[in-house]
Image (cartoon, grey):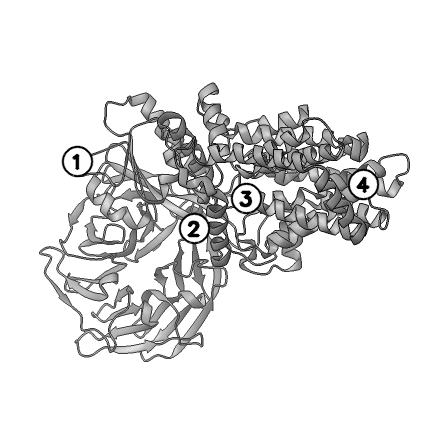
Amino acid sequence: LLLSAVLHLAVLGQRSFHHDESIHAKLSWDLLHFGSYRYDPTYHGPLLYYLTAATFAVLGDSDFTARLPSALAGISLIFVAWGLRRRLGESGAWWTGLLVTLSPLFLYYGRFLRMDVLEAALASAAGLAFLGTLRERRGAWWLLGLAAGLAVATKENAYVTAALAALSAGVVGLYVGPRKSLRRAVGWVRAHLAGIGLAVAVLVLVTIPIYTVGFTFLKDWCYPAKAISYWWHQHNIHRVGGPWWYHLPRLAIYEFLPIGAALVWAVRRRGRMRPLEVFLLSFGLGSVGLYCYLGEKTPWLGVHQVWAFIPLAGLELAHTFGPRGSRWGRAVAGVALAATVVTTVTASFVLDEITPARRRVEALIFVQTTPEAHAVAREGVRLAAKEGQDGEPVATVSGEAAWPMMWYWRNITVRWGRPARGLRPPLVLCDPDEEGAVRATLGPGYTRERIPLRAWWLMYQRRPTLVEAVRYALTRIPWGALGSTDIVVFHRGPKPPPVQDVAVPAGMARALGCRHARLVGGGEVGEPRGLALGPAGLVVADTALSRIVVLDPVTGKVTSRPDVPLDRPESAAWLPSGRLVVADTWHHRVLEIDPRSGALSELPPPPGGWYGPRGVAVRADGAVVVSDTGNKRLVLYGPGGGPPSILGGPGDAPGRLDEPVGVAWVSKDAIAVCDTGNRRVQLLTTDGRVLRVVPLPGAWSDFYSRPEIAVLAPDDWLVSDTPGKCLWRIRGGKVKRIVPGPPEIQPTGLAWDARTGMLVMGDLTGKVWVLEVPDG
């Protein structure tokens, strides 16, 4: 009991609140403060909300107290195990209690504001009460109705539990003998009609007031129909889907001890199993099969599948470590027990959160709020305490970040939506696709960072090799990439100066010998994708703010900002005339712009028109090449005008293209292109011949990585890899990966000036790095 209490309560409030946890906590808080609640099967049964609200009323509202009812339910399973001692023996009950305490799934989700462990505890109590009715224990029928009613009021899995219990009882009847069992069952029911009626009456009297919120919403009295119809629909549409075997690897990775030991016990006792043992085995196997069939696939449903195996495993371990156990059996069980302890502690206390910044991940974690988002939540609370609340919001929040921030920032002033013009809160959170509009509203004086809000790992996204599977089992290093939903966070502060001398990023110093670094354009750039150096300065295609900015690369001051309507331009380049060629990507056009006056004209579109043009490069004589990304081709304009010529086309053969983005002139007759979808860089002549193909199999993990390329010398190229947080140097046919930092940099655009040895590199955070490379 003490061990269970320590494991369930230690640092209980430390982990970031999952999306669902924040909803459950906020609904409970609203129930306490405003009395507002109505049963919605999307968020499961009402009981947890009442218990959590009561906990808030007594102990205050915090992350710890929000999870306390679930933790106490997990601890209570020790009493359920002890209640089985007459059936399992004291040693079997002791081992059952230890196993449920050390179960990775039960402990992780017993420290989690969800209903699953609470429902399992109440259904287990109902099972104990039913066993009491078989022994004619006084009050057992009343307790059965109460526990079953509370289980039904906790989560809709109770209906699945009831169906599995009925199925398992039928299996027991077949095992004992159909005729004999049927005769006994009919006789027993006739003899206990009063008790059965009492249990049903108590169940109804418990559940209807809970589901109708004290008879406030009388239409919810028929809650089973509302619950079953909703979740059957979710099953049919596979709302949170996955392969049928979704749960099996998780059960193997985490619950190998109770399931393995239970199966060993069943084999050992074949032909001699008692009815309770047959019931538990049938229930366990049936639950695994049924949850494999049901369309909803989430890790916490594993709690309901391992549940019935634990008492059987307790019997097996009591035998193994008892007088009749074998030495080799104790050795195997001891190793499995030690592995379970390591697995449990790691899952609940070491790798209990997920973020793309970490290399290891637990498969029992679903879509989880990241530590980075939790840090922003804590920052908001600190700012509210420091600056006070005079009616002005401490933060504005729009988009995905509403959850979990509605829970974390329940006690501070927040504007839920985009900031209004003139409003300058200390923190602003928005979705990435809102960044441009929000940035334009806020104006200067904010720094920006993009962070993962929620992260996940889809185990089934591809089949692992045997080596990858074993590596994951031992190290939790996953095969495949982690995914995330990102948000953009703006922090209010003084506007950074136009130019800042900074330390040279260590990786750039090692790889290129960079000897000086500065940041330019502070506060003026959102996402510097396209960069180009010319006599008139550094032009930046700012995708986030949908504009073009011209900076002095030495002083960092803005020299021009053409007022031209653009939609997420990806690239820009200087013409010999001093005008700009701009890929106005999502207006599906390529423009020629005068940076001083803003006068513009449109390049004649190629046959079939543009589809998201992204890359632009200009030759010394004025010839222009454009990557027509969506149409998977390059479009070439001669220096004297005239109709364009087409290079490439869809495909993966040499000379064909898939998602081409960055382009650069290598010589008068040769063009380098980042062939993103095929993960390679190709060198093509202006008439379409292939001079070189350089594979980059480790690059551009995201199909829409949008890499750019800079030509340092005819045989020395740099290519950006934003999701990989690196550059790729292609030199003399050899490829080398360069990690620019520390500090961490996510390279976007690249520009190079051989005359001055100046390399310019964009960063996804909005920084523009100007680096001096010796000897050009």
Residue 764, relative to residue 697: is it above or below? above
Q: Nearer the viewer, mark 1 or mark 3?
A: 3
Q: Badge 1: few (under 14), some or many (20 or more) residues near its Cα, within 10 Å?
A: few
Furthest-top residue in view? 58
Q: Secondary structure under badge 2?
A: loop
Label whose residue precedes the other's in the sequence (1 or 4): 4
Q: Nearer the viewer, mark 4 or mark 2?
A: 4
Q: CA distance from mark 4 to mark 2?
A: 51 Å
Q: Secondary structure under badge 1?
A: loop
Disc ID at residue 95:
none
Q: CA distance from mark 1 to mark 2?
A: 35 Å
Q: Badge 3: few (under 14), some or many (20 or more) residues near its Cα, within 10 Å?
A: many
Q: Which amino acid, by three-letter code, is at mark 1? A: Gly
Question: In the visual, does 22 lie left or right of 756?
Answer: right
Residue plotted at (27% across, 60% down): 571
Q: Badge 2: few (under 14), some or many (20 or more) residues near its Cα, within 10 Å?
A: some
Q: Which amino acid, by three-letter code, is at mark 3? A: Ile
Q: Which residue is mark 2?
A: 725
Q: Quadrant of the N terminus?
A: top right
Which residue is more in the foreground, 597 or 740?
Answer: 597
Disc ID at residue 422:
1
Q: Which residue is mark 3?
A: 365
Residue 651, relative to residue 512: is it above or below? below
Q: CA distance from mark 1 to mark 3?
A: 41 Å
Q: CA distance from mark 1 to mark 4?
A: 69 Å
Which residue is more in the foreground, 650 or 599?
Answer: 650
